[in-house]
Image (cartoon, rainbow, N blue to C red):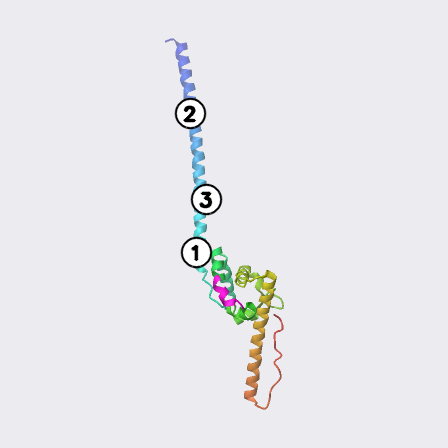
């Protein structure tokens, strides 16, 4: 074989080697892309698992509400419990409906909220009171639990407002009667002045 033929064969082999190298590089690039996609999928799966674990841990800290709700912490917990999923909302609605109906919230609010909360809150949070409207999920449950023909959210809020009024008046009537009794016990001849410490804000 002459030198020219050898050079041609060598050149052909080098071209084939370059083609093989390019093919290997292309394969490796595709393999790297596949690895990148797998890594991204793995990272997303890990994020979802971490989020699920965090949510499960949060749910462990959320207690099933016990009525009447006694404190602001109980209100916050009830709001979180109802907000966990639609089933919790339906569960609370089924539980509260027989407690509240057919009379409604005006006289039955005490079955849902303690006297402490009734005295500390009103709907809008005016006159130094805390704002009950900050608990929309709880209000949604109360609205559903008091549903009746012709019922609307406006009528519900009016009924809830009357419930706060009724609860506050009942408290101050008891307080006034207790003060009168104490004064009469100390001095039977003195009826004492009317208790003017009534809270007119509802």
Find the residue positioned furthest to the bottom. 189
- Residue 57: image tag: 1
Q: How far apart are marks 3 and 1 (CA)?
A: 20 Å
**Does the image show residue 9?**
yes
* Residue with the mark numbered 2: 21
Q: Distance between the residues labelled 2 and 1?
A: 53 Å
Quadrant where the image shows the C terminus: bottom right
Q: In this view, does 160 lie above or below 174?
A: above
* Residue with the mark numbered 3: 44
Which of the two labelled residues, at mark 2 and mark 1, occupies the earlier sequence position?
2
User: Is 95 colored magenta in this rendering?
Assistant: yes
Residue at 58%, 78% (x, y): give it: 173
Q: In this view, does 163 lie above or below 40?
A: below
Front label number (2 vs 1): 1
User: For the residue carrying disc 1, how many other residues have a C-alpha within 10 Å: few (<14), some (14-19), or many (20+)?
Assistant: few
Label 1, secondary structure: give it.
Answer: helix
Q: Are marks 3 and 2 in contact (CB under 8 Å)?
A: no
Quadrant where the image shows the N terminus: top left
User: Is 48 colored magenta in this rendering?
Assistant: no
- Residue 98: image tag: none
User: For the residue carrying disc 2, how many other residues have a C-alpha within 10 Å: few (<14), some (14-19), or many (20+)?
Assistant: few
Which of the two labelled residues, at mark 3 and mark 2, occupies the earlier sequence position?
2
Given residues 54 and 122, the one toward you in this image is 122
């Amino acid at each position: 074989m002459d030198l020219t033929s050898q050079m041609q064969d060598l050149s052909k082999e080098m071209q084939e080697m370059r083609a093989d190298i390019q093919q290997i590089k292309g394969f490796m690039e595709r393999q790297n892309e596949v690895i990148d996609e797998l890594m991204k999928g793995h990272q997303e799966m890990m994020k979802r698992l971490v989020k699920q674990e965090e949510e499960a841990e949060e749910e462990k800290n959320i207690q099933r509400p016990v009525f009447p709700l006694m404190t602001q912490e109980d209100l916050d917990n009830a709001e979180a419990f109802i907000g966990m999923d639609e089933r919790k909302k339906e569960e609370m609605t089924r539980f509260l409906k027989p407690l509240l109906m057919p009379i409604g919230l005006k006289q039955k609010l005490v079955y849902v909220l303690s006297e402490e909360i009734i005295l500390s809150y009103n709907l809008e949070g005016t006159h130094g009171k805390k704002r009950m409207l900050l608990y929309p999920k709880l209000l949604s449950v109360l609205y559903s639990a008091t549903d009746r023909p012709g019922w609307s959210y406006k009528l519900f809020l009016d009924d809830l407002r009357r419930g706060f009024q009724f609860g506050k008046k009942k408290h101050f009537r008891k307080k006034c009667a207790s003060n009168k009794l104490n004064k009469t016990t100390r001095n039977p001849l003195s009826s004492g002045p009317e208790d003017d410490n009534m809270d007119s804000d509802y």
